[in-house]
Image: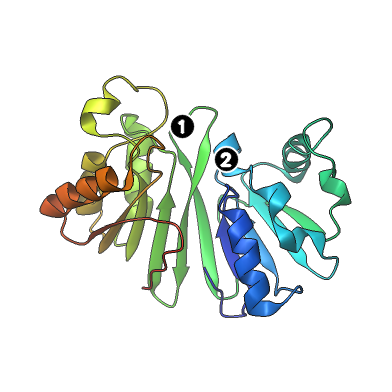
Amino acid sequence: MRLSTGESLIIDGGTGLRNLGIALAREHGATQPALHFLMTHFHWDHIQGIPFFAPLYNPANTVTFHSSHNSAQLKEILGGQMSLPYFPVPFEQLPAKKELVSIPPAGISYGGVTIRPFPLNHPQGATGYRMESDGAVIVHASDFEHGNARLDAVLKEYAQDADILVYDSQYTPEEYEAKRGWGHSTWVEAVRVARQANVKRLVLFHHDPSHEDTFVEDLIAQARKEFENTDGAREGWSIGV
């Protein structure tokens, strides 16, 4: 997401982060406007691109990592994946200026965007985000498993009237029966939440790595029969409100 100040808001740091760093360098050169990460949680698929993010290697850049964890915990977590023998460059030695910020429950604001965190039902916990700017709302709810009544209600509250809802749809309903407790949901539940929360556009996200593109396209087609304005997230894709 591009902020009004030209700064970038990035959610998590998976393997796609390497290509994003390259794209940002093409757009801005080596020195970037400030970069803000919103970390949902720290399972490997959400952080393993961070050591390969080129802007972190330029001392002129400022990169801020936001999380529901406190700054000391965040430093330990991000440093852990780059400690010996896992990576040759320690996190604290990355040349960019790094800021570690704990997001309060009331939220924060940057570049005209207000960001409100909320808890997700996921093993070891995860954080969703409601982002609001000039009346437009995007809600990001990756790594969420339905079935916890309290957290289901929280998600519905934060997704209410969103222009875009990005929702965890890793499994088909049939696959989910063997994956209960793994922390992910289905396109059927995504549609249900989108309807109940009066969402304008639904984006299915966190596709299972075993699903080929044609399989995902079929899931999107099924979802559109139930909620017409549905898309599937894909690499290199852009979407506007």
Residue placed most toward the observer, 237 or 132: 237
Query: Taking 5 as reference, is 146 left or right?
Result: left
| Circles 1, 2 touching at the beta carbon (< 8 Å) | yes
- Residue 58 location (% of width, % of height): 82, 65
User: Which element is circle 1 on?
Assistant: loop
Inter-mark Cα distance, 1 to 2 = 9 Å
At horizontal 55% and vertical 39% (from top left) the residue drawn is 45
* Residue farthest toward the left in the current orientation of the protein: 225
- Residue 167 location (% of width, % of height): 35, 48
User: Which element is circle 2 on?
Assistant: loop
- Residue 189 location (% of width, % of height): 24, 40
Q: How crowded is mark 1: few (under 14 residues within 10 Å), some or many (20 or more)?
A: some
Residue placed most toward the observer, 141 or 52: 52
At horizontal 21% and vertical 50% (from top left) the residue drawn is 196
At horizontal 41% and vertical 44% (from top left) the residue drawn is 206
**Where the C terminus falls, by quadrant?**
bottom left
Dividing the picture into quadrants, the one containing residue 239 is bottom left
Dividing the picture into quadrants, the one containing residue 3 is bottom right
First in residue order: circle 1 vs circle 2 = 2
Q: Residue 41 carries which label?
A: 2
Query: Taking 235 as reference, is 200 left or right?
Result: left
Q: Which colour scheme is used?
A: rainbow
Q: Residue 122 carries which label?
A: 1
